Image (tube, rainbow, N blue to C red):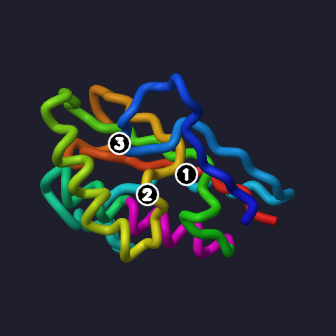
Amino acid sequence: MSVTLLSPHGLMQPVPYHHVAVATGSRHVHVAGQVARDPGGRTLAPDLRGQVAHALRNTARGLAGAEAGFADVVRLTFYVTRWSPDQVGDLLAGVADVAEELAMPHPMPPASLVGVEHLFEPDVRVEVEATAVVD
């Protein structure tokens, strides 16, 4: 495996992601921000939980197009509009809804959540970026 995920002693626990990813490999895959839209641009879910799940599915499609998967991911970034800490349950539920389907590691790779005022369209609540390293 080209990616090792770990959470060294002394870093905040528990969190739903690893703090560190160590990767070996020569091919880097960067998946641009993915949202909960189908190929025609139609919104697939109105709520945060549903949008997280569909954005992760689209992220998986982007990874697969580069012959990678979530096992190769070294970094995820979630951009969420109108963020408040009381929404963490919905965000994590969206991840849990697709984790097995997408073969996501548990805990997730290192991840950041960035609250933003808005994304490119008013109905888009979340955008997911991924970085992967493959041999």
Distance, label 2 to label 1, CA atoms, is: 16 Å
* Nearer to us: label 1 or label 3: 1
Instruction: Please name the residue shown 52% across and 23% down the image.
Output: 10
Instruction: Please name the residue shown 26% across and 49% down the image.
Output: 92
Instruction: Please name the residue shown 13% across and 56% down the image.
Output: 46
User: Quick one: label 3, few (<14), some, or many (20+) residues within 10 Å?
Assistant: few
In this rendered view, identify the residue nearer to me: 6 or 104: 6
The C terminus - image quarter: bottom right
Distance, label 1 to label 3, CA atoms, is: 18 Å
* Percent of width and height locating residue 106: 43, 57
The N terminus - image quarter: bottom right
Residue placed under numbered mark 2 in the picture? 106
Secondary structure state at the residue bearing disc 3: loop
Secondary structure state at the residue bearing disc 1: strand
Tags 2 and 3 in contact by the CB under 8 Å rule?
no
The reply, left or right, for residue 76 in relation to residue 84 is right
Checking the image for residue 120, the label placed there is 3
Q: For the magenta stretch, what is the residue range?
A: 56-66
* Nearer to us: label 2 or label 1: 2
Name the residue type under label 1. Ala
The reply, left or right, for residue 120 in relation to residue 123 is right
54, above or below 120, in the image: below
* Percent of width and height locating residue 102: 43, 72
Task: Residue lying at the far front in this picture: please name it.
Answer: 9
* Nearer to us: label 2 or label 3: 2
Checking the image for residue 130, the label placed there is 1
Question: Would you say residue 62 sits in the magenta stretch?
Answer: yes
Earlier residue among tags 2 and 1: 2
Name the residue type under label 2. His
Instruction: Please name the residue shown 60% across and 56% down the image.
Output: 73
In this rendered view, identify the residue nearer to me: 14 or 95: 14
User: Which of the 4 quarters of the picture holds residue 100?
Assistant: bottom left
